[in-house]
Image (cartoon, helix red, strand yellow):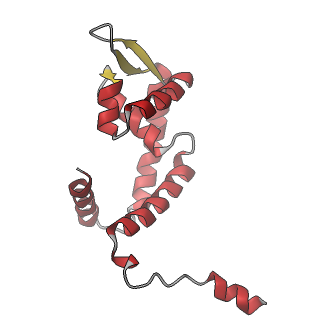
Amino acid sequence: MALKLKAERRALDPGALLPGLIGYRLRLAQQVVFRDFAASVSDLSPGRAGILMLIEANPGVTQSRLAEAAGIDRSTIVGVLDALEERRLIERRKGKDRRTNGLWLTRRGRARLARVKQRIHVHERRVAARLSAAERSQLLALLQRLGG
């Protein structure tokens, strides 16, 4: 029985096609990065941390512009923003016209984001530890070309 368990724990043969698929490799890398992010940051998902950083860099941004920048549909962004507002990390303020609201970090949101950024820097160093500075730059450039 012990021999059978050891055999089952060995990595599966990925076949000929799978190792050369960009999407497959990106997904495996994403899983590693997200697990480390969750262990490092824990109180915010990568997506929500990104949303807070976008609001910080663009105070007063509208929901629709934020959704577009984050690549999230407008109906999904509403729920994300509601959750962040409920945690008192962001606030909606009346925009330039009565139909729009601008988004702003609250004092609590700025403080939380400052702490999260420190942990993200540690996480990023750990995730990229196997890469030289040039390789890290090249990877970011290639991912930007793929993702726009």
Q: Is residue 111 visible?
A: no
Residue at the limit of the structure toward the bottom, as seen here: 3
Where residue 145 sits, quadrant-wise, is bottom left
| Residue 79 horizontal/vertical position (percent) | 50, 30
| Residue 36 horizontal/vertical position (percent) | 51, 56
Q: Residue at x 39, y 12 (%)?
A: 93
Q: Residue at x 53, y 45 (%)?
A: 41
Q: Taking 61 as reference, is 148 left or right? A: left
Residue at the limit of the structure toward the top, as seen here: 98
Where residue 26 sits, quadrant-wise, is bottom left
Where residue 46 sits, quadrant-wise, is top left
Give 59 or 64, whichever is nearer the viewer. Answer: 64
Q: Residue at x 64, y 81 (%)?
A: 9
Q: Taking 135 as reference, is 23 left or right? A: right
**Taking 126 as reference, is 7 above or below it?**
below
Q: Residue at x 38, y 36 (%)?
A: 73
**Taking 38 as reference, is 6 above or below it?**
below
| Residue 140 horizontal/vertical position (percent) | 27, 57
| Residue 39 horizontal/vertical position (percent) | 57, 52
Give 16 or 136, whichever is nearer the viewer. Answer: 16
Give 13 or 84, whichever is nearer the viewer. Answer: 13
Give 147 or 90, whichever is nearer the viewer. Answer: 147
Q: Is residue 28 visible?
A: yes
Q: Quadrant of the N terminus?
A: bottom right
Count of picture labels: 0
**Taking 124 as reference, is 86 above or below it?**
above
**Taking 135 as reference, is 92 above or below it?**
above
